[in-house]
Amino acid sequence: MEANVQKIRAYVQSVGATTWGLCALCFVMSSFTCSYLNILTVKYSPLGAAAFVAVWLYSKSQKTAVYSMLFALLGSLTFGNIQGFFALLIVFIFLSIWTFWQGADNIKSRDKLLILAAANLICVIAFSFSTVLSCLMGLLNALVSILIAVTIHNALTIFTIAAKRRRMLSNNEMLSLCIFFACIVLGFFGIKLPFISLASAFAVFITLTASYTCGVMGICAGLSCGLAFALASNNMNVILPLAVSALLGALLYASNKLAVTFVFLASIYVFGAAIIHSFKLIDIALGILPFMFIKSKVLKTIAAYSTAYEMKHIVDEKIAARLDGVATVVRVLRSLAKEQGTHKQLSGQLIAVCNAFEKLTNFTIEEHIEPEQKFKLVIGTASASKHSGISTGDCIGTLTYNNSQIVILSDGMGTGSVARKESELAINTIFDLIQAGFEPMQALECANKLLIDSGNAEIYATIDALVFDTVQCTAKLIKLGAPPSFVVRNGEIYAVFSESLPIGIVDEAKPHISNLKLKEGDNIIMMTDGISDSLGAGLAVTVLESIGLSHDVQQNAETILKAVMNGGVVDDMSIAVMVVTT
């Protein structure tokens, strides 16, 4: 018996708390049924399929998606109705067909929402096609289901971003969370238990917690939960007690926990239980007790995502003012350098430093919200040394910074560890400058100057850099003494050449830039001269044939390298093969 208990415990832990939480969400959501405006006998279930699709959009794990579907089906069978179960079943059937046809990794977000819409439309035909009014209500149910799926997905994404980046939430994000909790209130309304209402208890808990930790946003939470409860129960009297209690709780925002709880309890009891009779005392107690058991440290952590905004704004303004002062000094130095005829390279470096400080200033004053990254590069690399047992002098580096993926190939002078140090030094210097706020072009020019001024005339290296914009799906191919690169699209190959000197030779070395407009499925191939010189005129043909053999970029990189090595190794060789994906 004990062994079985241990196995069950191990299995539960292996699935993970996040997956179980998402499963519970799907179970609760699928329990809700409603008759819009209470004018139809048909009971709709807009939340179950919506919750599952939201989890499916959010989670990349197939195991999580399957478990969530099972719990959603269980909730619709236990507390829901046949219409909700039928909608989930259709989504599951469509999911299975689509996965078998396209593969699980090839289902895009819009496809998942289309599957949800199709399932709801089929339910309209099956359950709501008797009259014009019922048909319109069925279409309304389909629209509500899609909107709720998007809302839940946004809320789950906000939770993840806040947890990982430890940043405060904007007002719009807080509002999205309020709507998300209101949807959960609707889900709990479908779970009917004797003597207690889980929806009432959850609405009280969320409103009290939000009032204590978020102040004014607690009123928004109370109104959202109250409105959801009112729509589900056809009783508008539940809104006033939650709103008034949230207002009074917000007045004592972040003060003594017992004081806030007492004021909230007194107000919701007077307005909700004694006067309007919309809340039962047992429901109020069931909502307040979990709040009392939450540790103060946890509540302070929650508050940190919404409070202290003004404090952070003041601190950021002071930091930004200092950075702006430094930027002003750099501008003056740059003007003096220009007036006195100082070398143009120094003037350009001062401009780059000035721009970097201005970026830091803007970053700290304004709230930084990164746009959604729609595309990404999947990268495969392969390298070989000229001499067996000795490290290659080439170096490949990658950097993800803001909304860009940066890939750099550098070929140091000669072979072996010395050349390796040169190429690593060049790449690390460029990456450090980019992370400090320099534009890639400015970073290359400044790195060139730093290597020249290092005092070692023997240090130079080629640079082949790809800066890929993950939002716009565009790229800049920047070359300093690098061999040609290739773009393969739909079985056709395009070469990108440049005529420029390696980094670290002369002050005036200017990078050659090629602007690329890429598409999903495009392959980009970058290499050092050890590969391009060995293949010669057959380079493009070898690249095109290798890309056509497989969709695995790592395998393609190794195939091209192997083809070169079959003809003999005359130099260090490195190659990077990349493909644009969503």
Image (cartoon, grey):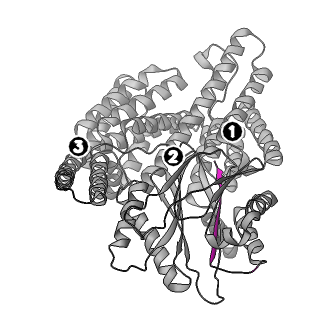
**Image quadrant of residue 329?**
bottom left
Q: Amino acid at mark 3?
A: Glu
Looking at the image, is 25 positioned above or below residue 501? Answer: above
Q: Position of residue 483 (x, y in %)?
A: 60, 64
Q: Amino acid at mark 2?
A: Thr
Q: Is residue 147 left or right of residue 348?
A: right
Q: Position of residue 15 (x, y in %)?
A: 63, 62
Write the residue at 77% across / 16% down: 129
Q: Is residue 44 left or right of residue 429?
A: right
Looking at the image, is 537 positioned above or below residue 196? Answer: below
Q: Position of residue 535 (x, y in %)?
A: 73, 69
Image disc number at residue 157: 2
Tell me if I can see residue 204 in this picture. no
**Quadrant in which the N terminus is drawn:** bottom right
Residue 576 falls within the magenta-colored stretch: yes
Looking at the image, is 473 positioned above or below residue 122? Answer: below
Write the residue at 69% across / 56% down: 63
Bounds of the magenta segment: 568-582
Separation (CA) of disc 1 from disc 3: 40 Å
Image disc number at residue 310: 3
Sort mark 1 into few (<14), some (14-19) or many (20+) by Cα contacts within 10 Å: some
Q: Which sits earlier in the primary sequence, circle 1 or circle 2?
A: 1
Examine the residues drawn in magenta and state their main secondary structure. Answer: strand
Tell me if I can see residue 239 in this picture. yes
Q: Is residue 424 left or right of residue 57?
A: left
Residue 16 falls within the magenta-colored stretch: no
Residue on which the image places disc 1: 112
Separation (CA) of disc 1 from disc 2: 17 Å
Q: Which sits earlier in the primary sequence, circle 1 or circle 3?
A: 1
